[in-house]
């Protein structure tokens, strides 16, 4: 464990050439800046820049976090989709509020989104489901997300069954598949700096629109 401690201490952070960030030259809305940073991450070769941590709290108030794929950023907010029987779905039913965190290490950039969560209509959720690739639809048809699995052979048999079902009915939709939208109350953009002069800019929603504020690092 001491070796691991030494190893962790020795890992370089905020290495390489990092982009600049001028908070004075930012757009009026966080969605625009987010799109700009996402495209920058793609250009920099960040793999899966649309992967994010979704944090929720259950009825007991205890947090849980997991990685999800961002589906879209619309005028309403940041969207993700998941199984209606999952832990996160249960959490969101009890406390419809979430935080999303993106980290693009090649750029030393972090984005944090917080806000209330709403579930999309059955039609919009079904459209999201049908836009998934074949493997992803078969996997989602399995249902029972996060429930105990006896062995991997049981999973493989269920995947074969789901693929056969999709072949017979390409429009099949997993019951409970739900598209969710986080309507941001705040979005924070964090630009890391090798010399630790990090820059933080937060957008807060107000009655008059978005208010921008610098934060101490
Ligand atoms: C890169 C990556 C992307 C993922 N994308 C999704 C996703 O879009 N939707 C989803 O339900 N789970 C996704 N998962 C799986 C979740 O992290 C998680 O294991 C699953 O949703 C069960 O979470 P829960 O038990 O907290 O509900 C992804 C995992 C990884 C590593």
Image (tube, grey):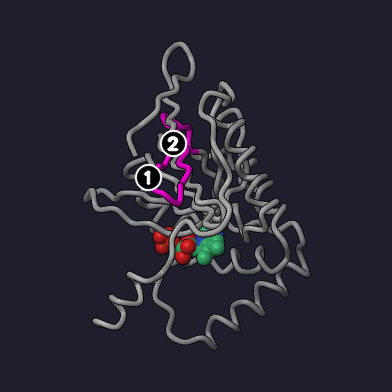
Q: Position of residue 35 (x, y in %)?
A: 63, 38
Is residue 156 in sight in this rendering? yes
Name which residue lies at 70% across and 51% down. 43
- Residue range of the region highlighted in magenta in the rendering: 182-200
Mark 1 sits on what residue? 93
Q: Quadrant of the N terminus?
A: bottom left
> Is residue 140 one of those drawn in magenta?
no
Identity of the residue furthest to the front in this view:
195
**CB of mark 2 near ligand 1 (< 8 Å):** no
Q: Residue 15 in the image: x percent, y percent? A: 50, 59
Horizontal arrangement in the rendering, residue 100 relative to residue 4 (left or right):
right
Task: Looking at the image, tell me whether mark 1 or mark 2 is earlier in sequence order.
Answer: 1
- Label 2: which secondary element: strand
Circle 2 residues within 10 Å: few <14, some 14–19, many ≥20: many
Q: Is residue 167 above or below residue 41?
A: below
Instruction: Please give the residue where the numbered disc 2 appears in the rendered image.
Output: 188
Which residue sits at x=63%, y=61%? 47
Give the farthest residue toward the top.
Answer: 208
Of tags 1 and 2, the one toward the viewer is 2
Question: Residue 173 has which mark?
Answer: none
Say which element carries label 1.
helix
Question: Is residue 86 in sight in this rendering?
Answer: no
Give the spatial CA distance, label 1 vs label 2: 25 Å
């Amino acid at each position: 464990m001491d070796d691991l401690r030494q190893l962790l201490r020795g890992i370089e952070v905020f290495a390489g050439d990092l982009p600049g960030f001028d908070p004075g030259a930012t757009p009026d809305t966080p969605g625009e800046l987010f799109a700009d940073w996402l495209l920058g991450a793609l250009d920099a070769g960040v793999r899966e820049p649309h992967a994010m941590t979704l944090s929720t709290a259950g009825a007991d108030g205890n947090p849980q976090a997991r990685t999800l794929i961002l589906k879209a950023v619309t005028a309403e907010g940041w969207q993700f989709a998941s199984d209606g029987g999952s832990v996160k779905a249960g959490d969101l039913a009890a406390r419809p509020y979430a935080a999303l965190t993106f980290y693009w290490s090649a750029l030393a950039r972090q984005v944090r989104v917080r806000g209330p969560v709403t579930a999309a209509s059955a039609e919009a959720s079904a459209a999201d489901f049908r836009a998934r690739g074949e493997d992803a639809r078969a996997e989602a048809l399995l249902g029972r997300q996060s429930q105990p699995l006896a062995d991997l052979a049981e999973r493989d048999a269920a995947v074969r069954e789901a693929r056969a079902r999709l072949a017979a009915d390409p429009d099949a939709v997993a019951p409970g598949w739900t598209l969710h939208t986080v309507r941001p109350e705040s979005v924070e953009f964090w630009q890391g700096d090798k010399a630790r002069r990090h820059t933080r800019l937060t957008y807060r929603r107000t009655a008059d629109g978005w208010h921008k504020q610098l934060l101490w690092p």
